Image: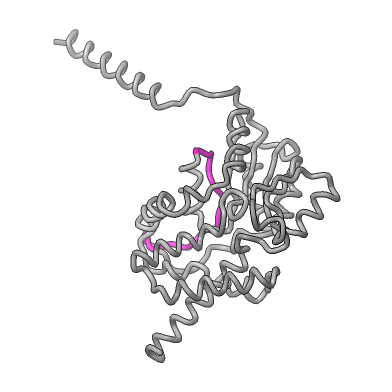
Amino acid sequence: MRRLLRRRQDAAKIAGEVAAAAAIAAPTAKPDSTAAAFFDVDNTMMRGASIYHFARGLAARGLFTPRDLLWFAVGQAVFRVRGNENPDHIKQARETALAFVAGQKASDIVSLGEEIYDEAMADRIWAGTRALAQAHLDAGQRVWLVTATPVELARVIAQRLGLTGALGTVAETVDGYYTGRLIGDLLHGPAKAEAIRALARHEGLDLARCSAYGDSANDLPMLSVVGHPHAINPDTELREHAREHGWEIRDFRTGRKATKIGLPIAATAGAVAGGVAAAIALRRHYRRSGPV
């Protein structure tokens, strides 16, 4: 009886080890533990603003109205034409950027994020940028997304692309539900650089050996904190800065880029935040005053 039990235990152990071995992907290169790469998302890894595509998916599922989505888009367009970010809108964004998911269950939003990525975002990934990320992975380096997009959505994008993980804006949850408030600030501008520094301390990274990729002058803090900065689909200010400092420039855009190089294709964090804020403010107005 004991012999039979021992054989069963041995068999279970072997089965467990085999299953674990099958789940671990064979490394493509010797791990490089002190170097990593950091990629912005909007217009760097993906065409357009990821949170806008996410909002479209939520609107299609009835989480807020088409009218809200319209004003969301109008807000993006206005800020994109202005080409700058109003500090008042950034301040407002801290309070309202994620209000459209207030009261929603966090796990449900993650599941919706996976669906919406497959439906509306997968085809918008820049193949050239994806290849750059893969090159770092093939060299044994870890790769993180760094974005003002909610971290739950950023993680979905990272997982779908086979990347290490993501740094994103963190929303407050209570008992598994979003409150509509942020924890801290939007992960934007200097906050991206601080997040990279904090991660580097935790992971033992040598920032001088790390790389970063961004499309906007708002990414300069992130790009400047690493030893190997790259401008991807850059706006005018970033392009000029990159040229002055000898940074590598890659542009994967076609068509409009020749004449619209100074007009960012993707909304900046301020554009997204402003658009969300406008949508929410108007939604509240309509609810108080009734349909027009």
For the view shown, which residue lies furthest in the left direction?
1
Magenta-tinted stretch: 162-177
Please give left or right for residue 242 compared with residue 66 in the image.
right
The foreground one among 121 and 253 is 253
Is residue 146 part of the magenta span, yes or no? no
Quarter occupied by the C terminus? bottom left
Q: Residue at x 57, y 41 (%)?
A: 130
Please give left or right for residue 31 compared with residue 219 in the image.
left
Q: Residue at x 61, y 43 (%)?
A: 129
Please give left or right for residue 21 compared with residue 147 in the image.
left
Q: Position of residue 265 (x, y in %)?
A: 62, 60
Q: Position of residue 83 (x, y in %)?
A: 70, 68
Q: Is residue 290 above or below residue 199?
A: below
The foreground one among 108 and 250 is 250
Quarter occupied by the N terminus? top left
Q: Position of residue 251 (x, y in %)?
A: 69, 48
Is residue 172 part of the magenta span, yes or no? yes
Q: Main secondary structure of the magenta part?
A: strand
User: Toward which corner of the image does residue 87 lie, by quadrant?
Assistant: bottom right
Q: Is residue 25 above or below residue 80?
A: above
User: Toward which corner of the image does residue 283 lie, by quadrant?
Assistant: bottom left
Please give left or right for residue 207 compared with residue 276 in the image.
right
Q: Residue at x 26, y 19 (%)?
A: 12
Q: Is residue 164 above or below residue 224?
A: above
Q: Position of residue 237 (x, y in %)?
A: 77, 59
Q: Residue at x 36, y 68 (%)?
A: 63
